Image (cartoon, grey):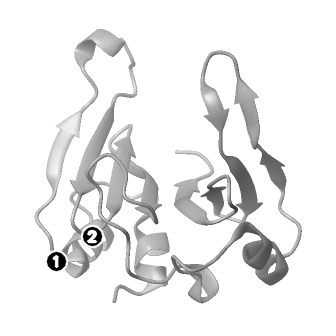
Amino acid sequence: MIEWQKFVNALGYAEISEEFLKLENSIGEKPEVSEDPIEYNDPDQTKYYEFFQTGILIGFRKQHLNHIQFFFKVENNYSIYKGKLFREIDANYTEKMIIELLGNPSNKGGNEQSPFLGYINSWVLYDMGSYTLHFEFTKNGDLSLATIAVLSI
């Protein structure tokens, strides 16, 4: 199992940094690497490292690690992430359990129907100082996705 701190330590670092290379090696799966198409006309273009079997997606913007997503439900060919996050949070956690563990979130939303996007999952966001921790939940309140992201690059 990968230590939570390795994920946090890699945030904001370049692809060739020791911090990212240690994290990538710890994951132990060869990623599929892709980038946003040039047609997106995004000057900060995102590069993705997708670890489908491990259930992790890592995104680089401006050539620095911007965010890491952990999948807790099978989605878009990602397996369920089997590890533990901050404070031992894992796939068995619900929205209620996370709020009881971490307290009131910095922000929350979702759990609504959008005419354009369909159902928007309930979510909570915690400001962790140097990064944010974002959780999304199914209609039943089960954890479906977690994202850690740098505050700015």
Relative horizontal placement of residue 126, taking residue 7 as reference (left or right):
right
Residue located at (70% from left, 62% from top): 141
Q: Which amino acid lies under the numbered mark 1 shown in the image of this protein?
A: Gly
Q: Amino acid at mark 2?
A: Thr
Residue plotted at (75% across, 79% down): 97
116 or 131: nearer the eye?
A: 116
Secondary structure under tag 1 reads loop
**Residue at position x 24%, y 20% from top?**
37
Q: Residue 19's spot in the image, x, y percent? A: 32, 72
Q: CA distance from mark 2 to mark 1?
A: 9 Å
148 sits left or right of 11 in the view: right
Location of residue 33 in the rendering, given as x and y in whole percent from the top left corner:
16, 46
Q: Residue furthest left?
A: 30
For residue 54, the mark is 2
Is there a contact, CB below 8 Å, between mark 2 and mark 1?
A: yes
The mark found on residue 8 in the picture is none
Q: Which residue is mark 1?
A: 28
